[in-house]
Structure formats: C-alpha cells, structure tokens
Amino acid sequence: MSVLEFEKPLYEIEEKIKELKEISESSGMDVSNQIEVFEKQAQEYKKELYSNLTPAQRLQIARHPERPTFLDYVNLITQDFIELHGDREGCDDRAIIGGVAKIDNQNVMIIGTQKGKSTKENLVYNFGMPQPQGYRKALRLFNHANKFKMPIITLIDTPGAYPGIKAEETAQGTAIAVNLKEMAKLEVPIIAVITGEGCSGGALGLAVADRVYMLEHSYYTVISPEGCASILWRDASKADIAAQALKITSDDLLKLEIIDGIITEPLGGAHCDYELTAKNLKNMILTAINELKTIESNKLRDERYNKFRRMGVFCQ
C-alpha cells in the first residue's frame, strides 16, 4: 500500500510490529508484551493523526492512488449494472461511465468519473478528466433517466475537465454549461457524491443535485490548491496555504451549506476498507432517495434551483 508523507511515522511503528512478529516466529522468543505495546501505540497515534488532519493532508488522502474508483463502488453497491455507451455523436469518453442499475430494489441511473489505479489504466480513463463528449454522454443518460422516472446518482472524482486544445475545440465550456442548465430542469431526484477529488467545472458538470454529499476525506473546490497558489503567488509549492484558504474540506463545506452531508470513511481513509466505505455510501444514497421520492417533481426542481441560488454571500 502506498504510504503518504504524513503517515510515515505510523508506518514505521507498523513495520516495527511486523519485525517483532517475524522474530517471534523464527526464534520462538515470546515478545507478545512488546508487540502489544506497539500495537496500542500505533492505534492511539492513528486515531489522533486522523482526527486532526490539515486540509493539505486530506488532499493527499483524496488523491490516494488506491482510493476506490467509480467502478469499485458500482460493483459494491449495485446489482444488474448495464453500462450505456456513447454520446450518440460518435464518441464514448471513458473518463465518464454510466448506466442503469439497481440499489437493493431501487432502479437508478448511476454515472461517475472513472480513474485508474495504474498508469496504463489512467491512460484509458484519461486520468479521470472528461472531455466534452463525456459530458454529452452524461446528459444523454440524465434525459434517459428523466424519461423513465429513475433517480440519478453521480459519483465524482476528478481533478477537473480535460484542459487540452482538442477539448476546447469541441466546446468543453459549452458542454459543461449545458449540463448545468439541463440538470437544474430535471424532474427526478438527483444525488451527487464527491468521492475523491471534486475540482472546478469538471466536477460541477455532474453535481447540480438535490442532495450533494462528500466522503469525509474528499475535497470540493472551484480550483485546485496548486492552481490557486500559481495564480496568487506564482508558486505552486504554496498549495498547502491555498488549501487552507479555499475551504475545500467536507467539514468546511458543510458549515458553508455547500453540501448536505458527510459520509464517514474508515480510519485511515476509504482505501483502507472498500466494503465499509461502500456500505456508508449506499446507506446515505438510499436515505436520500426515499426522502426525495416523496417530493412532487415541480417542487423538487424549484428547491434544487433555489439551493444553488442561495450559495455565496455578496457584500455591498
């Protein structure tokens, strides 16, 4: 497992425990007391460490290469998933994947950004950075769900929409803007969850929802901390300062009423226990669906619109 920079002291303790266990097995020496002391120390240190994370440290967890991906969650929380391909204009952007599925007995349309866990996979999924064709595919699936009265679930983990020349030539900004407009008008419940990185319009293009949730150690921001630092200070190394100022964490965004709830992660992050993370995610989604299903479509649409209009404070 990849070890993050701030986790190295904890890793050293765990390595010491492993070393003592190997000594005990090879020599027959009884070192159980020493092992118990180190295990208690490791557990206490881990609890303290993860209860006092800085925004920059949460940023590292959100970007962990072994964090669960969209397809991991699909496999863990849904049944009978059928992927629907293409934007009907000749392209199938693999950075956005979606299809129909069941969560327990509830039919849903589930759509999300997909990253890889290796360089080879990331090249297939364009490192989770969608192109205009991906947003057009998502819009096609939104309209399909609206037609057949299926709740929409979006799972978002992207560093942003792809910024290449080809994406700009094929109307990246327009594709995202159209999604924002059309999602606001849909008459079915929409639930968006930031599962890792939720950066810029690339994330918002899938997140105009009735309920927006974040996994505990994910982040959601208008610009990456590195991008912000480069603009403000001409120095990307000041990203830690920018992360603090941007209020990117789930705790900050819940206080600011940008999101509606936080989904708890296992101690150490979602990558430490896929099944527990998926269970917490599934419970939150089903609770939201059951709540939103009771609201009439016109009222649902109006409340969604007003939800986003209330965001931000303007001073004269």
Image (cartoon, grey):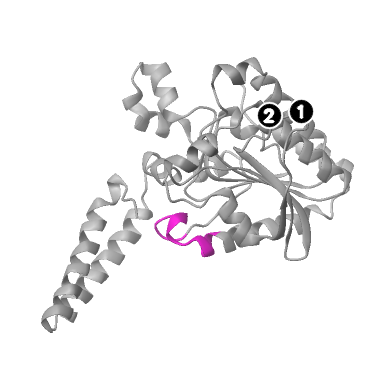
Q: Residue at image x 44%, y 55%?
A: 271
| Count of residue discs | 2
> Which residue position holds label 1?
89
Answer left or right for 229 relative to 90: left
The quadrant of the image that shows the N terminus is bottom left
Q: Which amino acid does label 2 sit on?
A: Gln
Instruction: Find residue 210 and report its image quarter.
Output: top right
Callout in the foreground (1, 2): 1
Q: Residue at image x 24%, y 66%?
A: 41
Q: Residue at image x 40%, y 27%?
A: 226
Instruction: Find residue 105 and report its image quarter.
Output: bottom right
x, y percentage for residue 247?
A: 48, 35
Q: Can residue 292 be seen in this view?
A: yes
Q: Is residue 226 above or below residue 128?
A: above
The quadrant of the image that shows the C terminus is top right
Residue 275 inside the magenta-drawn segment? yes
The magenta region covers 266-277
Q: Can residue 310 be seen in this view?
A: no
Q: In this view, does 120 lie above or below 25?
A: above
Q: Tag 2: Cα neighbours inside 10 Å, few (<14), some, or many (≥20)? A: many
Q: Residue at image x 35%, y 61%?
A: 47
x, y percentage for residue 274?
A: 50, 60
x, y percentage for residue 73?
A: 59, 55
Residue 178 inside the magenta-drawn segment? no
Q: Do the residues labelled 1 and 2 touch (CB within 8 Å)?
A: yes
Q: Tag 1: Cα neighbours inside 10 Å, few (<14), some, or many (≥20)? A: few
Q: Quote the CA–CA distance across marks 1 and 2.
A: 8 Å
Disc 2, SS: helix
> Which residue position holds label 2?
133
Which mark sits nearer the N-terminus, 1 or 2? 1
Q: Which amino acid does label 1 sit on?
A: Glu
